[in-house]
Image (cartoon, rainbow, N blue to C red):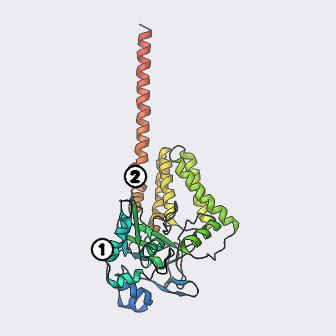
Amino acid sequence: MLCRAFVPTRKGLGWLLRRPLTVPTGPPRLFRQSWARSCASHLQSVAEVQTPLHEYHFEVKEIEGKGLGAFATKDFEPGDLVLAEYPIIPVRTNEGGDAWNEELHRQYDQLTPEAKAEVFKLHDTCIQKPEKSLEGILFTNCISRDSGARFDVALCLLVSRFNHSCSPNLEQSWDEGTGQAYLVAAEPIKAGDELFTYYVDLRLDQKERRQRLRESYGFESTEHYPPESDQRRTEMKSLDDQIIRVQMNNPEKGLRLVKKLMKLYDEEGLHMYSWRKRNCLHAVQFCLKRRDTAGAMRWAKKGLRFSRLAHGDAHADTKTLLQLSKDPSTHPAFESRVEDIRMVSNYVICASIAFVAWTVYTYQ
């Protein structure tokens, strides 16, 4: 299945982002007339079938030889909200077989004729017949929501219009709590700059990224990176895999791996704050396993900063890290540490009782 890659751990799963204070938590609001006059015709046609959740500061327009792309109409700072969007077609099922396809068509049949027309304006790289298919459009443009369901993806009209870069300037996210996809600025962006997300795992080497883009999305990447970039990116993936394998068995090694990985992000210039947040959460666990509560709080505060940039204050991860930055004892790893202490204490008590009993018996 084709699916845009939004989680660095595997292809085609997840989304991660949002902006504190600006992410809408209430019902969708009507967009302003001034905004409608300034936006491109594509945004206006989408607005006819979907009520915008906030004032957009980008426009979708034609790029010669490349199709459509999204461009900033104002300057953005890291963490600024670029887009919050409800999916036009959500597909979630725990059933096997063709249940996902039945749900897809059920959702599609509920759309207005205008909305159906907008869906079929999206690209289909799975064409096996002369015409597009709903399944092909879904697999080319969908985002996975990672809810744990057997099949769980969402199709968003505007998110699908943002092009790929191996050095994206946007952070991407799906928030299960609000049921929205988000794009936020991952670095300073100037008005007029094109806005990029990413479709494949950025930690693959350049050759494999190009191959996946060609096979899955039907275009050739024109970006060029030096060999040192491939070395850093493949090492990122290796370190991430090692951190997961280490888990709690060797917290000292785990912390070294996290620090090395965070340094590589800076050296490569990848500003994916959700990745850094996740690594900070690993570091919190490693510190608690080492009985280093102060260290756990420091890493939790770092993770909180990254989570706010990537997701905003309302996200579940941000709330978790805020709590951990104040009281690491709320983390399951702390409970595990306490249980370890109890086991050791019980062992010492039992050993002491046995020694006393043996002494009394010996000298009677």
Residue marked by disc 2: 327
Q: Residues within 10 Å of mark 1 (few under 14, many from 20)?
A: few
Q: Position of residue 305 (x, y in %)?
A: 47, 64
Q: Name the one closer to the observer, 270 or 4.
A: 4
Q: Name the one closer to the observer, 306 or 64.
A: 64
Which is closer to the viewer, label 1 or label 2? 1
Q: Position of residue 66 (x, y in %)?
A: 56, 83
Dividing the image into 4 quarters, which one contains the C terminus? top left
Answer left or right for 213 relative to 135. right
Taking the spot 57% from the left edge, 51% from the top edge, the residue there is: 242
Q: Which mark is residue 229?
A: none
Q: Position of residue 148 (x, y in %)?
A: 39, 58
Is 172 above or below relative to 232? Answer: below
Question: Can residue 232 be seen by looking at this rendering?
Answer: yes
Three-letter amino acid code at the position of disc 1: Gly
Answer left or right for 221 relative to 320. right
Q: Name the one closer to the observer, 277 or 116.
A: 116
Name the image quarter holding residue 82.
bottom left
Secondary structure beneath label 1: loop
Taking the spot 46% from the left edge, 48% from the top edge, the residue there is: 293
Q: Which mark is residue 26?
A: 1
Three-letter amino acid code at the position of disc 2: Asp
Residue furthest right in the image: 227
